[in-house]
Amino acid sequence: MLMTRKQLYDMRGAISRMMASPQPTKLSYRLGKVLRKIHSVLAQSEIKRQELIRKHGTVAADGTSYQVQADRMPIFEDAMDKYLKDPDGKVEIEKIPYDLIANLNLTAGEMMVMDEIIESPKED
């Protein structure tokens, strides 16, 4: 299925939890294959976010990082949103079989944002 970077970016918390949750080897291997592409897109999005912070921000008081000031935040947010929603940035994502994540402890909110990439559970 085709998804925008924005859709995947909104899932980053749940995806991070899924990637960090220990599972039996067979399930971890399959889930890892499915999440590899998503993780790559999220890594690229983080690089872009850091570029935009440097572009629209100023050096923080500690001198080692950048910070976007409140008056520049709308410009930064618009630029990031434009990048995430760019139709040329759509990515083909394989759905995650429900049985791979059935034993994970995810919140209802995490499941809600990930609903589009999870295959419906099989009825017995």
Image (spheres, rainbow, N blue to C red):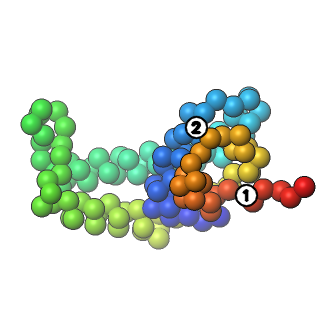
Work out whether residue 67 can be spotted: yes
What residue would you read off at disc 2?
Answer: 19
| Label 1 Cα crowd, 10 Å radius (few <14 / some 14-19 / many 20+) | some
Q: Position of residue 52 (x, y in %)?
A: 26, 54
Q: Position of residue 100 (x, y in %)?
A: 73, 43
Q: Quadrant of the N terminus?
A: bottom right
Which residue is at the far right? 124
Which of the labelled discs sits on residue 79, or is there none? none
- Nearest to the observer: residue 67 or residue 48: 67
Q: Quadrant of residue 56?
A: bottom left
What residue would you read off at disc 1?
Answer: 119
Numbered disc 1: secondary structure: loop
Direction from residue 98 to residue 43 in the image, left or right: left
Q: CA distance from mark 2 to mark 1?
A: 18 Å
Q: Position of residue 49 (x, y in %)?
A: 32, 51
What residue type is disc 1 on? Answer: Glu
- Nearest to the observer: residue 70 or residue 75: 70
Q: What residue do we see at 83% from left, 56% from top?
A: 122
| Label 2 Cα crowd, 10 Å radius (few <14 / some 14-19 / many 20+) | some
Numbered disc 2: secondary structure: helix
Q: What residue do we see at 77% from left, 46% from top?
A: 99
Q: Quadrant of the C terminus?
A: bottom right
Q: Position of residue 12 (x, y in %)?
A: 48, 49
Q: What residue do we see at 13% from left, 40% from top?
A: 60
Direction from residue 62 to residue 124 in the image, left or right: right
What residue type is disc 2 on? Answer: Met
Work out whether residue 91 can be spotted: no
Tag 1 or tag 2, which sits nearer the N-term?
2
Which residue is at the far bottom? 87
Which residue is at the far left? 61
